[in-house]
Image (cartoon, grey):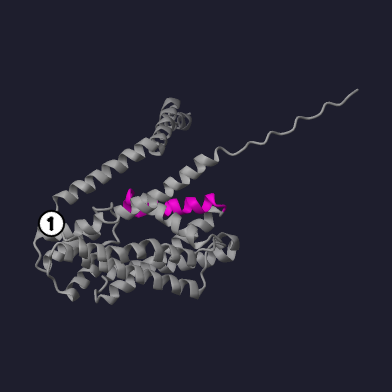
């Protein structure tokens, strides 16, 4: 009798379950509303423009010269790395467009997680299973992290012990999980190329992208007129990449905070250091809006012109005579 009373008490009332379900549906509707997403985008761009207007006078030429290789690395080398590791069967151009779209959503999410979610969504919508899509994007992330580690080591920055242990544990678990999954469910990794050649190509492409990120940092510092030692600045770049392991929002991440602190350690004033870090944080918005937003707008326009898919009506059953 007592147990029955306890079971009744533990069971949530019906109105509470209905209210929770209604709240979840309302939150999903608000998040999926195009006007809400547009308002968030407008507010973000307005904040970026206001921040740029408050920065000290910057020379545009060094920033433009550094931004062009970075855009090529971000929107060409990274999609080619994803294409090399993915067995989706789609063309390079398809991966370039999907990656550009994901970058716009990644700028709006903490830890750039929205980019991975969008890439998995695009793969699933194109006909790939969910497990191979997730595995392909996870492998691309893992290879990208390996490129970051190699770039950090190339700058002479010593990785902290906990970071090395965590990286070794994650890599070991990932390899063990992949081997186990391949043995038990071979079709689950049908969209992943785990051969040495694609992985090596992906690591080289990732290192090339990290070189373009370092060039962007150099260009931002030169744009605000900060005279620093290039070798020491390279070490600061490596330290900021290590801090980038911690998640954060675009423009307010530990990586940009570590970059500003490192620049002040090199002798720059806080105003100049914050200006350089702000330029590095805000510059990715322009190509994300132009390339990613343009690709999304083009897809919507093509879908609108094509119209809704034709619905084929089932033939009516013929009546038997007699």
Residue 115 drawn in magenta: yes
Is residue 37 in view from this perspective? Answer: yes
Quadrant housing the C terminus: top right
> 274 left or right of 162?
left
Image quarter of residue 315: top right
Residue drawn at x 83%, y 26% as measured from the top left:
319
Image quarter of residue 211: bottom left
Q: Position of residue 25 (x, y in %)?
A: 43, 33
Magenta highlight range: 106-127
Residue 242 drawn in magenta: no
> 58 left or right of 281?
left
> 60 left or right of 137?
left
Residue drawn at x 59%, y 39% as measured from the top left:
309
Residue located beneath label 1 in the image:
57
Q: Quick check: 249 above or below 317?
A: below
Image quarter of residue 116: bottom left
Instruction: Tell me the crowding category of disc 1: few under 14, some 14 to 19, or many 20 or more residues within 10 angstroms, Cα based.
Output: few
Q: Quick check: 117 above or below 10?
A: below
Q: Quick check: 288 above or below 4?
A: below
101 or 169, which is in the foreground?
101
Q: Secondary structure at mark 1?
A: loop
Look at the magenta stretch and give its main secondary structure: helix
Residue that lies at the very extreme toward the right in this rendered image: 322
Is residue 170 in view from this perspective? Answer: no
Q: Position of residue 202 (x, y in %)?
A: 43, 70
Residue that lies at the very extreme toward the top in this rendered image: 322
189 or 89, which is in the foreground?
89
Q: Position of residue 274 (x, y in %)?
A: 15, 57
Residue drawn at x 33%, y 74% as measured from the top left:
150
> 238 left or right of 295?
left
Q: Position of residue 29 (x, y in %)?
A: 41, 34
């Amino acid at each position: 009798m007592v147990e029955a009373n306890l079971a009744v008490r533990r069971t949530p009332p019906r109105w509470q379950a209905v209210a929770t379900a209604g709240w979840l549906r309302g939150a999903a509707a608000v998040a999926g509303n195009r006007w809400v997403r547009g308002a968030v985008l407008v507010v973000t761009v307005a904040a970026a423009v206001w921040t740029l207007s408050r920065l000290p006078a910057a020379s545009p030429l060094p920033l433009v010269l550094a931004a062009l290789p970075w855009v090529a690395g971000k929107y060409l080398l990274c999609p080619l790395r994803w294409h090399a590791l993915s067995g989706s069967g789609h063309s390079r151009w398809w991966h370039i467009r999907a990656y550009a779209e994901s970058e716009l959503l990644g700028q709006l999410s903490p830890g750039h997680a929205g980019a991975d979610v969008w890439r998995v969504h695009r793969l699933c919508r194109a006909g790939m299973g969910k497990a191979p899509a997730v595995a392909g994007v996870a492998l691309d992330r893992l290879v990208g992290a390996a490129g970051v580690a190699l770039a950090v080591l190339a700058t002479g920055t010593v990785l902290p012990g906990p970071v090395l242990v965590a990286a070794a544990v994650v890599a070991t678990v990932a390899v063990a999980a992949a081997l186990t999954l391949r043995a038990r469910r071979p079709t689950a990794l049908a969209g992943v190329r785990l051969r040495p050649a694609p992985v090596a190509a992906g690591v080289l492409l990732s290192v090339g992208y990290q070189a373009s990120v370092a060039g962007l940092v150099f260009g931002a510092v030169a744009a605000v007129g900060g005279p620093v030692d290039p070798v020491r600045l390279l070490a600061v770049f490596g330290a900021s990449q290590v801090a980038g392991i911690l998640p954060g929002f675009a423009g307010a991440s530990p990586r940009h905070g570590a970059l500003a602190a490192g620049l002040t350690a090199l002798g720059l004033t806080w105003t100049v250091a914050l200006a350089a870090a702000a330029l590095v944080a805000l510059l990715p918005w322009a190509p994300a809006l132009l390339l990613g937003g343009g690709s999304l707008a083009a897809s919507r326009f093509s879908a609108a012109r094509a119209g809704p898919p034709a619905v084929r009506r089932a033939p009516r059953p013929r009546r038997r005579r007699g």
